[in-house]
Amino acid sequence: MVSNHSHRQVQEQGIIQYIEERLPVDGLRELAEKKKVPLHKHSIWYYLGGIAAMLLGVQFLTGILLMVYYVPEINSAHASILKLNSQINFGWFVRSLHSWGANLLILALFVHMFSAYFMKAYRKPRELTWWSGLLLMVICLAFGFTGYLLPWDEVSFFATKIGLDIAEKMPVLGHMVSYMLRGGDSITQATISRFFVIHVAILPVLLVGLLGGHLFLVQVHGISEPESFKKLPPEKKSYEKFFPTFFFKDILVWVLAINVLFGLTTLCPWGLGPEADPFAAAPIGIKPEWYFLAPFQFLKLIPPMVGPIEGELFGILLMSVVGVVFVAVPFFDNGTSKSYAKTATIFGWLILAGLIGFSIWGALS
Ligand code: HEM
């Protein structure tokens, strides 16, 4: 007679065989067994990409639920969010999860981006991982910008107006892009329609494709090792298996992040201001979301004219140059020159200090 234990083993074998005959899981299993994570004092930063991926999952799930009630129509958008907040069971909760989730996601992405930068993970052969990551960052910021307008309250309306007015000043494409996004010269129904479609259809498609590429590249190249770790003799280097060791730690970190998210969601539920009135004057001291505050504050400090160039245009050009160097850093710092490596690190610290400094200044002023 077959014991219960061996009966279960036979059943498990059967299931595994069934899957293996239909899906090429062998390669995946091999990959999972081979993948390893370097252990050193900076290993903690390896969790950030995973946290971002988990938070993205939360955004997709809560976003789909929000779409059930949200009405992308100028006379109903605000009322539909008000109804969600006050009449629909757990509506406030789902909306608050989505709003706080977006903020935590962008925060996690900034930390992920700078930790990859300072660990010099952009160097050969990971240039494409770096650039796909930067595009993901732009997409997530675009999610934030387009989503912010949708509740159609006073702050969201005027913050969007300021953002589009700044975009308008960009050289060459500025006017065309902001005109297309608005659907004209002012923010109207056409703008809500465009922002809604961009937010719920165009950006998700771009994001899913690009994220697939990003994660594929991470598997192809394995996790990068910081210079100080690479230099160690082999007997001093230690690793842990990705599966199951690091994977289970990843899940533990996700649980912690979800606790932070649920704490914020329930203790500080996301509010809703009065309905936007496009004909009213902008409330005094209106500011964009915290992740756009640094460029906003920087532009405010520039005088109206810098020589023959308009101040805002000058500021935008200056920030664009800094941005281009940040994007192109794998070309300058490719691991062959110590002085370039040092310069890249100092440049990174300056950008980080600038972002934090101007954001705090913008928040306080
Ligand atoms: C939706 C956004 C993103 C998700 C879900 C994501 C996810 C991940 C994951 C899971 C990893 C592997 C684990 C880790 O090193 O953290 C990773 C690695 C990496 N990511 Fe991202 N990422 C995103 C955006 C970005 C951004 C904005 C950048 C920077 C421009 C970036 C650059 C990199 C680099 C260079 C690596 C390789 C790190 C290494 O090998 O040490 N990623 N990403």
Image: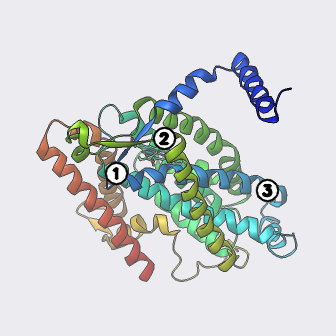
Q: Residues within 10 Å of mark 3 (few under 14, many from 20)?
A: some
Task: Using the image as rendered, state which of residue 230 and residue 365 is in the foreground.
Answer: 230
129 with respect to 65 (left or right) = left
Cβ of mark 2 under 8 A from ligand 1: no
Select label 3 or label 1 by which is in front: 3
Mark yes or no: residue 19 visible.
Answer: yes
Q: Residue at x 40, y 56 (%)?
A: 44
What is the C-alpha distance between the residues marked 1 and 2? Answer: 38 Å
Q: Work out whether residue 176 can be spotted.
A: no
- Helix, strand or loop at label 2? It is helix
Residue at left offset 70%, top offset 74%: 277
Residues at marks 3 and 1, CA–CA distance in whole angstroms: 37 Å
Q: Against 334, is 118 above or below?
A: below
The amino acid type of the residue labelled 1 equals Ser
User: What is the three-letter code of the residue carrying label 2?
Assistant: Phe
Vertical side of 45 occupied by 149: above or below: below
Comparing 263 with 143, the one in front is 263
Q: Is residue 359 above or below residue 111?
A: below
The residue to which callout 3 is attached is: 65
Against 18, residue 150 (above or below) is: below
Three-letter amino acid code of the residue under disc 3? Leu
Quadrant occupied by the N terminus: top right
Circle 2 is placed at which residue position? 242
Q: Of label 3 and label 1, which has the lower sequence position?
A: 3
The residue to which callout 1 is attached is 320
Task: Give the mark toward the camera: 1 or 2.
Answer: 2
Residue 67, position as x, y percentages in the image: 79, 55
Split into quadrants, the picture shows ligand 1 in the one at top left
Tell which of 210 and 303 is nearer to you: 210
User: Is the residue marked by circle 1 packed among few (<14), some (14-19), or many (20+) residues within 10 Å?
Assistant: few
Q: What is the spatial separation of the Cα atoms under label 2 and label 3, in whole angstroms? A: 33 Å
